[in-house]
Image: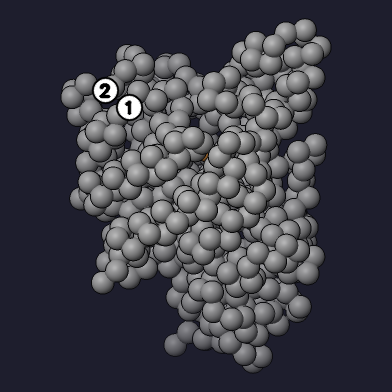
Amino acid sequence: MVQLSHHDLLIRGGTVIDGTKAPRFAADVAISAGRIRAIGQLADHTADEIIDAGNRIVAPGFIDSHTHDDQAVLSRADMSFKISQGVTTVVAGNCGISAAPLKPDMDLPMPLDLLDTPPGRRFTTFAAYLDALRETPSAVNVAAMVGHSTLRAVTMDSLDREATPEEIGAMQALLEEALRAGAIGLSTGTFYPPAVKATTEEIIEVGRPLSAHRALYVTHMRDEGDKVMEALEETFRIGRELGVPVVVSHHKVQNTPNFGKSAATLALIGETMKHQCVSLDCYPYNAGSTMIRTDRGMLDGRVMIASSATHPECAGRDLDDIAREWDMAKDEAARRLQPGTAIYFLMDESDVQRILAFDETMIGSDGIPVGERPHPRLWGTFPRVLGHYCRDVGLFPLETAVWKMTGLTAGNFGLHQRGTLKVGHHADVVVFDSDTIRDAATYEAPSQRAEGITAVIVNGIVAWQGGAHSGARSGQVITRTPPTSATSTRRPA
Ligand code: ZN
Ligand code: CU
């Protein structure tokens, strides 16, 4: 008989917020062999290692619902920029861009180059990518999607048109391979040049394999500005035709004429949720970040260069200043800085707050782990929601904030036995101080780790404690659980 009161790890004296939105309660948490073994008053229990959580919150490890960490989990496997925030799981493969499948010698059109894929380390199948992650784990768990733009780039000789039936068949076969290997869904980025010409019908046809796997359709929509309502309708239609849950990525309304429109978009999303599975995520900033581009009104507001292959010295500078110095128009300067990434101040703070406060909105960073001057969301998203928006602004109670980054996300993405603190679940846990937690990353100094994170545990192993990385790489590959569990659907009965 095993000794049930001795554990690998005991988190003592904390206040548990379990990720279900239930009110907090005082309890100890015991962990052994990667799982949560007991939650309660465990004064007579012992452990090899004890974490004192007095005056601290003990919560499920945060799940970053929207990332571009596909390559970073291999090339920067300590994942300090996420672990230091309390993130224990990342959902990768967003916005139509994934690390696999690629051809070894192909050119990567923007924005596929955002993943910083080294030419010598490319995966021609999704199975090979997931195998590499299992062989050399990172510090965080990974659930990965296949990108539609990536499928187009490997399949089509020209991206400037709709796919032919043969090309659609080839993309379906690649998607099927990925889903069998363990991909949790398909993402699209019809906002971006490689997929602008893809019609709704092309996406539905390419997405056919999702239906049998009941995998997710996740999208950086065609339009988040003037035609955001039409883009939402297109997204919902694709979900209905395929009979799969949809996720609206980094929901926002951009460009000044659209400020305030989030009242209408959220009303439409809320109404649609009554009839089909819809979820959405948001990052807690009023500036976005993506490839340097000159169309779609992207240069209308303040633009800060985050990275540039041609002029790396311009990272961190405003495009206005660069254009003035070079004595040319903003768009001409932007073209000279390509390829690269930029930060665009295109949103209204009241829309950001309204979307964050919408009950069903998950928290996702959309962090881009390339360059010296990334958007601060890469290092700051989760503590910013907990500190700034929850505690200081008062957008929602702490239990709701935690749920938006744990239980809600695990349910929407079908991440089995993650996202809530329950006996038997995987032991992904974060211990933090709700009075002092705050993001330290700014636009000027973006690579600053957050304050107030006491300890981060991934699959039962301490990855972060006392402001330092332990060196642990205990992350796992998470594959989607077929939706027999009640949490993976929100259709009405
Ligand atoms: Zn995106
Ligand atoms: Cu993204």
Image vertical order of residue 221 relative to residue 322, above or below? below
Contact between labelled residues 2 and 1, with CB atoms less than 8 Å apart: yes
Q: Check disc 2 and report the residue beneath it.
A: 163
Instruction: Identify which residue is drawn at 38% across, 39% down.
Output: 230
The amino acid marked with disc number 2 is: Ala
Residue 221 percent coordinates (x, y): 43, 38
485 or 475, nearer to the observer: 485
Residue 345 percent coordinates (x, y): 67, 35
416 or 271, nearer to the observer: 271
Q: Check disc 1 and report the residue beneath it.
A: 198
Q: Is residue 110 visible?
A: yes
Instruction: Identify which residue is drawn at 77% across, 43% down.
Output: 442
Image vertical order of residue 34 relative to residue 190, above or below? below
Q: Quadrant of residue 86?
A: bottom right
Q: Quick one: label 1 or label 2, which is nearer the N terminus? A: 2
Residue 380 percent coordinates (x, y): 69, 49
Q: Is mark 2 within 8 Å of ligand 1?
A: no
Instruction: Identify which residue is drawn at 38% across, 59% down.
Output: 271
297 or 490, nearer to the observer: 297
